[in-house]
């Protein structure tokens, strides 16, 4: 039996990596994750073909959902953990048993407009969304297909 497509919200600071960068690159490792809960979701739950909303975080007035991408690989060891010149080295990670993982993502599209965090908070339909729960600061989180579809629809208005 084929596994159902899952949906994700994945955050990146646009100064570090933006939807424009992904559009240019078309495929890119989603690396630099240094949270065990998020690593475990990438390892255990994410699958090739899953879809994700690209969310610009800490972007001032434009914080919000900016695009759509697809998961293009299973989780694999994040090479930045072993590179002392990278923005996310981890000298304690063992190449024989890597601590951190990443997945490849591919660009699907830029939304016609940013659906801001402030706007997301106004929709009752999204009131249970993990992103909007107090204290939830994970850089990757699962979302429901209905949340994904609703946000895409709002972006087109």
Image (cartoon, rainbow, N blue to C red):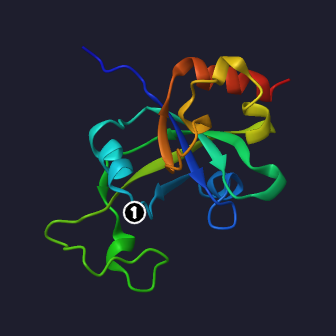
- Quadrant (top left, top right, bottom left, bottom right) of the N terminus: top left
Specify whether 155 is left or right of 44: right
How far across and down, in percent of the image, does residue 130 sit? 53, 34
Residue ID at (13%, 70%): 96
Secondary structure found at label 1: loop
Q: Quadrant of residue 83?
A: bottom left
How far across and down, in percent of the image, does residue 60 sit? 79, 58
Neighbour class for label 1 at 10 Å: few (<14), some, many (≥20)? some
Specify whether 113 is left or right of 10: right
Which residue appears farthest toward the left when viewing the image? 96
**Residue placed most toward the observer, 38 or 155:** 38
Specify whether 15 is left or right of 45: right
Specify whether 66 is left or right of 144: right
Q: Quadrant of residue 47?
A: top left
Residue ID at (58%, 17%): 146
Q: Is residue 74 visible?
A: no
Q: Give the residue number, with chain letter if any, for mark 1.
A: 34
**Residue placed most toward the observer, 94 or 135:** 135
The correct choice, above or below, for 80 with respect to 117 in the image is below
**Residue placed most toward the observer, 94 or 25:** 94
């Amino acid at each position: 039996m084929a596994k159902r497509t899952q949906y994700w919200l994945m955050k990146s600071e646009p100064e570090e990596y933006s939807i424009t960068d992904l559009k240019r690159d078309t495929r890119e490792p989603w690396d630099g994750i240094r949270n065990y809960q998020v690593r475990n979701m990438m390892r255990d739950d994410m699958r090739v073909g899953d879809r994700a909303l690209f969310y610009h975080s800490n972007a001032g007035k434009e914080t919000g959902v900016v695009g759509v991408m697809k998961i293009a690989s299973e989780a694999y060891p994040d090479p930045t953990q072993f590179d002392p010149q990278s923005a996310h080295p981890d000298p304690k990670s063992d190449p024989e048993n890597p601590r951190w993982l990443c997945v490849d993502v591919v660009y699907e599209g830029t939304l016609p407009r940013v659906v801001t965090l402030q706007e997301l908070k106004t929709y009752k339909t999204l009131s249970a969304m993990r992103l909007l729960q107090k204290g939830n600061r994970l850089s990757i989180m699962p979302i429901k297909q209905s949340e994904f579809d609703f946000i895409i629809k709002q972006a087109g208005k």
